[in-house]
């Protein structure tokens, strides 16, 4: 059959595709999930809008659609840039030390100052809070958080710590908890004291599936430097330092401290 011809003197009819055409819209005016495709799409749209011929031949609804897509693509690129810039740096590592607990049986929980129903009254009580996050800023649920530290006399609950000061009973010395759905953890302990050349600190070991295990230490502002002339880990030490805030227990009006130490784990 002979193809249909246009009557003499008439311009060729241009077939107009509906707005739902894949050439003008992607998932109801969405944009491509790939950044480079989004950039190409924006370039083509801007070229069409800036072309006097193309712009005049478009009807009003199509011009509005293209302008809407351009705005959506711009917002998407902005969001992608913001997400990339919000990546968190993993928490610095620190040495494990010689007194990692050897026996985790028995009463091991997040309350280090209550053992067998008895309260450890020495030292300054500390409520230690924090969250375990991924480098993307999202909480890590079910991460295992372990801490260990000295008691009010500067002794670890470890068979190899034969320090001069006597070991006081009633202090648990180490604890272990799992993070909740918000990635949060909580310990009730005491503020450790400095001993020998070491400033006051609490040891941490954190592990979660899909993330690199972290061993580090937490220090306290104003007393986070070594007593010797050794000055290593200066920048990392600052990131591992917390500020304590006095709080008051409503029941006993006993002065306490609280501190927050957030931890960021690197992915495997």
Image: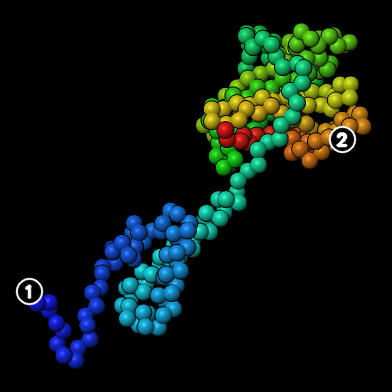
The dot on residue 232 is none
Front-most of 223 and 20?
Answer: 20
Kindly identify which residue carries mark 2. Answer: 231
Q: Is residue 210 visible?
A: yes
Image vertical order of residue 120 relative to residue 37, above or below: above
Is 202 above or below relative to 54? above
Q: Quadrant of the C terminus?
A: top right
**Which image quarter holds the N terminus?**
bottom left
Task: Judge the density around disc 1: few (<14), some (14-19), many (≥20) Cα neighbours within 10 Å.
Answer: few
Q: Residue shown at 71%/35% (left/top)?
A: 92
In the rendered image, which quarter is residue 23 located in?
bottom left
- Residue 242 is situated, as x and y percent measured from the top left of the image, at 75, 35
The residue indicated by pointer 1 is: 1
Left or right side of 195 for 213: left
| SS at mark 1 in the image | loop
Q: Is residue 30 above or below residue 254?
A: below
| Color scheme of the displayed model | rainbow
The residue positioned 16% from the left and 90% from the top of the image is 8
The residue that appears at 82% across and 38% down in the rendered structure is 234
Question: What distance separates the C-alpha of mark 2 from that of mark 1?
Answer: 91 Å
User: In the drawing, does residue 244 fall left or right of residue 227?
Assistant: left
Determine which quarter of the picture holds residue 201.
Answer: top right
In the orientation shown, which residue stands out farthest toward the front? 2
| Relative side of 9 to 29, left or right | left
Residue 92 in the image: above or below residue 43: above
For residue 240, which quarter of the picture? top right
Q: Are marks 2 and 1 in contact (CB under 8 Å)?
A: no
């Amino acid at each position: 059959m002979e193809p249909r011809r246009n009557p003499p003197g008439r311009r060729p009819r241009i077939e107009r595709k509906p707005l739902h055409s894949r050439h003008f819209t992607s998932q109801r005016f969405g944009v491509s999930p790939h950044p480079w495709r989004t950039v190409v799409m924006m370039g083509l749209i801007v070229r069409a809008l800036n072309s006097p011929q193309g712009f005049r031949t478009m009807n009003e609804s199509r011009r509005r659609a293209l302008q809407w897509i351009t705005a959506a693509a711009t917002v998407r690129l902005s969001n992608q840039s913001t997400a990339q810039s919000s990546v968190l740096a993993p928490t610095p590592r620190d040495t494990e030390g010689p007194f990692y607990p050897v026996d985790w049986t028995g009463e091991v929980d997040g309350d280090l100052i209550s053992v067998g129903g008895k309260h450890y009254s020495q030292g300054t009580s500390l409520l230690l809070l924090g969250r375990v996050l991924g480098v993307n800023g999202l909480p890590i649920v079910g991460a295992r958080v372990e801490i260990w530290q000295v008691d009010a006399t500067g002794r670890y609950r470890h068979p190899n710590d034969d320090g001069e000061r006597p070991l006081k009973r009633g202090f648990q010395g180490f604890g272990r908890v799992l993070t909740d759905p918000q990635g949060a953890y909580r310990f009730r302990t005491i503020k450790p004291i400095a001993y020998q050349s070491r400033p006051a600190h609490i040891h941490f070991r954190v592990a979660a599936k899909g993330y690199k295990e972290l061993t580090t230490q937490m220090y306290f502002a104003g007393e986070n430097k070594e007593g010797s002339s050794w000055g290593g880990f200066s920048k990392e030490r600052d990131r591992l330092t917390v500020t304590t805030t006095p709080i008051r227990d409503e029941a006993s009006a006993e002065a306490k401290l609280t501190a927050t130490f957030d931890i960021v784990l690197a992915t495997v």
